[in-house]
Image (spheres, helix red, strand yellow):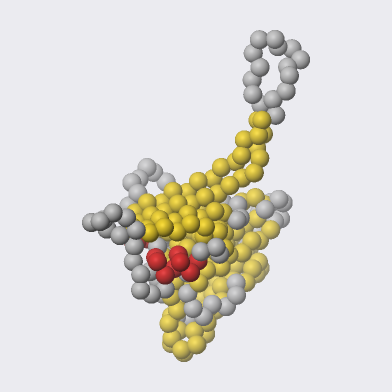
Amino acid sequence: MAKFTLKGVRLFSGGVDLTSNTNKVELKAEIEEKDVTAFSVTSTTEVWNQVIGGLATTTADAEGQWEAGDASKVDDALWAARGGLGPLTICPAGATDGALAWLTKSLSGSYALGGQVGDVAPWSASWAGSWPLSRGLVLHPPGTARTATGNGVVRQLGAVTSGRALYVTVHVLSAAGTTPSLTVVVESDDNAGMSSAVTRATFTAATTAGGQSVQIVGPVTDDWWRVRWTITGSTPSFLFVAAAGIGPA
């Protein structure tokens, strides 16, 4: 990916697309620095610090313009999410199929609103990762409505070695129709044709907007992945986004 300006950043939390209400997003992954410096057995002049990695931490911060009135608005969504764990997916330059995505399961720990007289009403929020942060790809874009059972585009995310895991987030943004139901499945194979696809995880059937995340622990030697979905109901229609990435287990 070439250099770019932040214009089309996408932010998905739980079952809500916060993009149109957000004008700042910061994602941070840190590994705690632990000092293990000891006396030198050879030097009496210079002794250099020695460190090892400690606990790893993921945090995300966002802010933007406040709106309220239904479950898709920032105030309704973030107020309901306080203190809960759910999927968080951030795409730095749009969320087209196959686009870069950063994802984790996170705690919605902070929500603030309000400002000075004359301001466009602001909001801000913070999330703390409860799973490792993983870097991957969008496996299903948010702007494509699905009304029938189907498959996503196959992506070569790579094999999952021992000690690592594939993390997958699904954000169901809307559900319409009579008794609509959407079940998303994660599949893998050793070839792009998915001629012998293996089901690796099945999400709980979704009937309303909401978010889910799964962890698929390695080793998995297959390196090609996709999502498949089953839709039932009378005139059903769903908007959802799915992303997957490999990280430490």
* Residue 105 visible in the displayed image: yes
- Residues 148 and 245: in front is 245
Say if residue 101 shows up in the picture.
no
The residue that appears at 70% across and 29% down in the rendered structure is 36
Report whether 22 appears left or right of 104: left
Q: Determine which quarter of the picture holds residue 43.
A: top right
Q: What residue is at 33 percent from the left and 46 percent from the top? A: 5
Q: Is residue 3 above or below residue 234?
A: above
Q: Is residue 217 above or below residue 187?
A: above
Instruction: Tell me where residue 185 appears, x and y as whole percent.
Output: 59, 71
Q: Tally the numbered discs.
A: 0
- Measured as percent of width and height from the top left, residue 230 is found at 54, 79
Q: Residue furthest top?
A: 44
Q: Considering depth in this image, is 209 or 125 the residue closer to the camera?
A: 125
117 vs 226: above or below: above
Q: Nearer the viewer, residue 149 or 216?
A: 216
Image position, residue 237 (x, y; %): 43, 80
Name which residue lies at 44% across and 48% down. Answer: 26
Q: Residue at x 54, y 75 (%)?
A: 229
